[in-house]
Image: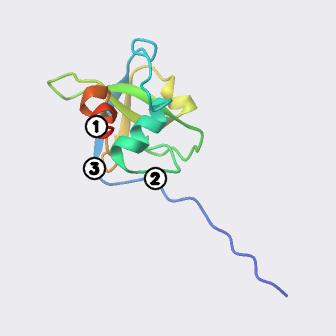
Amino acid sequence: MSQVQIILPPRPYRGGTVKVKNIDKHAQSTCKCGSWLKHWEKSSGHRITYCPVDGCLNKDLVGTLFQKVEDHDHGWFVGPLCQLHSRAMGELIVAEAYTLVPADTSLTCAKLSL
């Protein structure tokens, strides 16, 4: 008789968090990476499976443009969120462990391709 291994998804991240808010994703077109998710993966050097919003285990990730709520520079960042949270209005609590990448392509992918 063969054993069946059940792999459960990770528990929600309980480390440090950062508050973010979505910005108009049509305000800036994507870069030559092809999508904001690919931009994030290329620039951060990471890949993730689950949405980094606290308590979310959705896997349908897209690259999303947002700002840190409590950051004074109000720069635009790119990060992975699930489809549901990429359309959410208001503040989201995201695991701080995930690298946030500047949306300014001159600081990221354009620089990497030189």
Identify which residue, 65 or 56, lies in the foreground. Answer: 65
Q: Residue placed farthest to the left in the image?
A: 72
List the residue tagged with mark 2: 12
Residue at image location 46% in from the left, 13% down from the top:
26
List the residue tagged with mark 1: 114
Q: Residues within 10 Å of mark 1 (few under 14, many from 20)?
A: few
Q: Residue placed farthest to the top in the image?
A: 27
Q: Are marks 2 and 1 in contact (CB under 8 Å)?
A: no
Residue at image location 46% in from the left, 53% down from the top:
12
Residue 97 horizontal side relative to residue 24, left or right: left
List the residue tagged with mark 3: 16
Label disc, if present, on residue 97 of the rendered structure: none
For the C terminus, the quadrant is top left
Q: Is residue 98 above or below residue 86?
A: below
Q: CA distance from mark 1 to mark 3?
A: 34 Å
Q: How is the image coloured?
A: rainbow
For the N terminus, the quadrant is bottom right
Position of residue 85 measured from the top left corner of the image (x, y, whole percent): 50, 30
Q: Is residue 68 visible?
A: no
Tell me the amino acid under the disc marked 3. Answer: Gly
Q: Is residue 21 above or below residue 114?
A: above
Tell me the amino acid under the disc marked 2. Answer: Pro
Q: CA distance from mark 2 to mark 1?
A: 38 Å
Between disc 1 and disc 3, the foreground one is: 1
Q: Earlier in the sequence, mark 1 or mark 3?
A: 3
Q: Residues within 10 Å of mark 2 (few under 14, many from 20)?
A: some
Q: Is residue 70 visible?
A: yes
